[in-house]
Image (cartoon, rainbow, N blue to C red):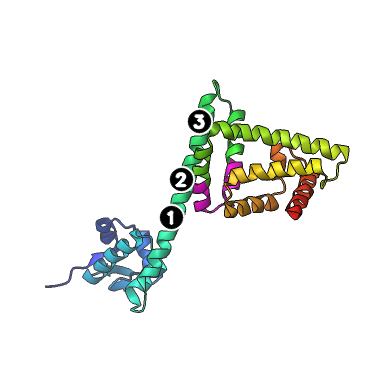
Amino acid sequence: MKDEYLKVGELARRSGVSVRTLHHYDEIGLLSPALGGHGSHRLYGRAEIERLRHIRSLVALGLSLAEVRDCLDDPRFAPLPAIEAHLERLRREERDVRRLRDRLEAIARSLRAAETPSVDELLQEIEVVNEMEAFEKYYTPEQLEYLKERRTEVGEDRIQAVQQEWQELFASYREAMERGDDPASEAVQALARKAHALVEEFTGGNAGVRESLGKMYADSPETPSRFGVEPALWEYMGRAAKAWEESC
């Protein structure tokens, strides 16, 4: 049976692939016409049409054109690593979409609570969510899941109470600093013990979460200021915490 040849325009119409794409495939050596080229009509036969079908299937899986060419032409090509790499890309994209969804849901909840939400309120909520995202990047997915469960265990009432306790603790530290109290003094060490207890309550005693928390504060000197803690006070609290650790 005589082979049927299609011109590039007809192949584009039947396959749903643009003429421009077919020309590009030809230029990079992925799919060349059986006949023609360089000014004459490009003609594609059955073998090229079948190859195009394979190309489209592999591209649909997310493989790059270079990977598709290697898959079809190189007998040594191992498809599993390429598929696994694409799976990882999809997982990252899925996490990004999930984070964006959670971000929008958090903003929407806050805006619903306002009777007449304004643009300023929207921008404030975006800042809050940005801070949450900056917080989350220091924790592994397992640690974030642990903290989520920990939040449920502790309960919202206790979380609100702890936030108030931290503010009172900051005020007590500030008074001690302004009086000139030695960070190693008994009174300031009592504050350090209280701070340690609050951190332990937050982490649930999980050493990995505690380490991630410490790294976040070490890498982000501006973080304490979000809680109204100026650099001098933060440094004073750090000296008190060091003295408490050395005494244990």
Q: Which mark is residue 109?
A: 3
| Disc 2 secondary structure class | helix
Q: Is residue 171 left or right of residue 47?
A: right
Q: Please check the rendered image and state whether residue 212 is part of the magenta-colored stretch, yes or no.
A: no
Kind of residue sitting beneath label 3: Arg
Q: Quadrant of residue 165?
A: top right
Q: Closer to the N terminus: mark 2 or mark 1?
A: 1
Q: Is residue 28 left or right of residue 199?
A: left
Q: Position of residue 41 (x, y in %)?
A: 30, 68
Question: Of 146 and 76, which appears nearest the observer?
Answer: 146
Q: Magenta: predominant secondary structure element? A: helix
Q: Closer to the N terminus: mark 1 or mark 3?
A: 1
Q: Closer to the N terminus: mark 3 or mark 2?
A: 2
Measure how far apart labels 3 and 2 are at the Cα level. 16 Å
Kind of residue sitting beneath label 1: Arg
Q: Residues within 10 Å of mark 1 (few under 14, many from 20)?
A: few
Kind of residue sitting beneath label 2: Arg
Q: Is residue 197 above or below residue 2?
A: above
Disc 1: which residue: 91
Query: Which residue lies at the image location 63% right of the left edge and 50% below the top edge?
Result: 213
Q: Residues within 10 Å of mark 3 (few under 14, many from 20)?
A: few
Q: Position of residue 226 (x, y in %)?
A: 69, 39
In this picture, which residue range is highlighted in magenta? Answer: 130-146
Disc 2: which residue: 98
Q: Position of residue 114 (x, y in %)?
A: 55, 23
Q: Position of residue 109 (x, y in %)?
A: 50, 30
Whether residue 157 is visible: yes
Measure how far apart labels 2 and 1 are at the Cα level. 10 Å
Q: Quadrant of the N terminus?
A: bottom left
